[in-house]
Amino acid sequence: MSHLLSLTRAARLVGVNRVELQKKMKSGELIAFDGMVAFRDLLACYPDAQLEDISEYERVMQIKERAFGKRVFEHVLPDAEVLATRITDLSKRLTRSETQIRQFNALLGRVWDKFRETEKQGAGEAGATLSALRHWLEDEVAQAMEPGFTNPLAIKDGVLSVLSAQVTLLPSKQDFLVEGQATLLEAALRAGVSLNYGCSGGNCGLCKGRVVSGQVKKMRHHDYPLSETEKAQGVVLLCSNTAVSDVVIEAAVTDGVQDIPFQQISANLKAKASLNDEVILMHLQTPRSQRLRFLAGQRVVLKVGASYTAELPIASCPCDDRNLLFHVHRQPGNLFSDYVFDKLKNNEVVGVEGPQGEFILHEQSGRPLFFFAFDGGFAPIKSLIEHAMSLEAESIHLHWIGSTRQQIYLPNVGRAWDDALDTFDYTELVIDSDLRAMNAKRETQLHEYLALASKQQDELMQGDIYLAGPEEAVAAAERFFLALGLSKSRVFVEAVK
Ligand code: FES
């Protein structure tokens, strides 16, 4: 059997996402062996795959790059020593193959000699049969040795194995690629894998993992002392090491919000941008050594100025735990909002405490995802969607319902995702009435829209529903979906002030 590839690697080679390959496996179009695929079968499924084919993968990366900020997807080459080791490994494999071919050729020479000797000794019909067999074999071998078709995927895999390494986690069996100079922890977060960790800076020891096979390399100094026994067992800190070769690592992943510790961080305002007259995008950056660990969809308490506070959902993804985005709405008379709109300056310190909240993605469900954002409810929904995209969710639908046009303050984000991804669709609706003040008439109007959306999207009854926005609006929407027959365990609600 030819060399087997993991789904992550195979998807990268043919430039599609893992969901597409999974669908082909389910339909029997692509043969899989224990979740792995062979080059030959992959190429049979994607006969036009080319060395430079990166279409779907690259499109998703571009979206993520725009959405998550530059730091996360800096395309840099791996560390020189890592590159040298990978190239050395590749050239060892090449040398081994060349040696085997030479030995094989020598063996063939001896086989032909033996044949001729036996032919001479054989009489009549037996000698003729042997001679015919030898000629046939010689022709077959000559044909097989001719430099003909070269599998482009095998060449590309060689390049990929120099530029990246695959990590498989045990016991969760999640896998991801480590690229550039990312540490194992950074690469996991980018891929939406919630590894256990604390400081990200080599101080707490919470990111310990045991290398079961493969080679890792320490990239960053860590103060946390590993005992001699741990070192002998192959324990490393995932925030300080990168993968040199494909590795298998035993490491704990987050089970839920209970695994995330309460944190207090002094961040700085990196940038402030007006999205319209009513909403400001606030970009906070934490110190390198103290990043915020959180799950997509959670919120934190922010403190500015003379301790003006607000509890706000994080509008970015845990894949970038240092750059935190918030949507601050103008609320005249609210000291926090007034301060952010009128006084907050670049580099000013903003206290961050948390995270809290249980409005998180239920990753294991595998069901289609339906997000309904009402006004400022887009902030936690955006975080959830970015996380779902990191996990390559199969089907994502976003409805943004605004009291006014102003309340749909980032329409281009949803439209860009819709344009770029086949697995994503976006709808927006301006309802022209205040979603924070529901009455019977407004609730009927909202229910009519939700009924229309449910009719148009027959997948909805099989999906998970995420609702975020003003308390009155999400409560009304929740009543609608429960009345429709959806189980409470599939409707998730977040009230955003
Ligand atoms: S996260 Fe704290 S030592 Fe790695």
Image (cartoon, grey):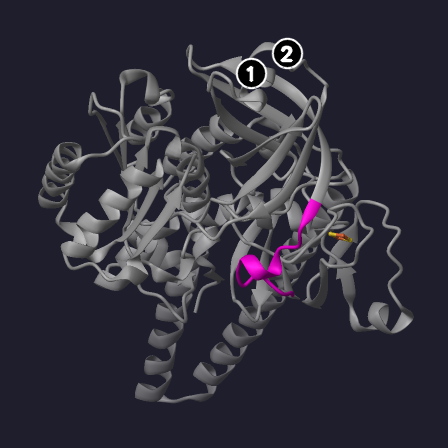
- Give the numbered dot on residue 338: 1
The total of numbered circles placed on residues is 2
> Which residue does the numbered mark 2 point to in the structure image?
343
Report the amino acid beneath label 1: Asp
Query: Element type at marker 1?
Result: helix
| First along the sequence among labels 1 and 2 | 1
**Apparent side of residue 446 relative to residue 384 in the rendered image (left or right):** left
Whether residue 394 appears in this view of the structure is: yes
Instruction: Report if residue 259 lies within the magenta region.
Output: yes
Tag 1 near tag 2, CB within 8 Å: yes
Viewer-closest of 72 and 291: 291
**Apparent side of residue 124 relative to residue 98 in the rendered image (left or right):** left
Whether residue 38 appears in this view of the structure is: no
Kindly report which numbered mark, 1 or 2, lies closer to the viewer in this rendering.
1
Q: Which residues are magenta?
A: 251-263
Query: Element type at marker 2?
Result: loop
Viewer-closest of 209 and 34: 209
Report the amino acid beneath label 2: Lys
Residue drawn at (25%, 49%), measured in percent from left and top? Answer: 478
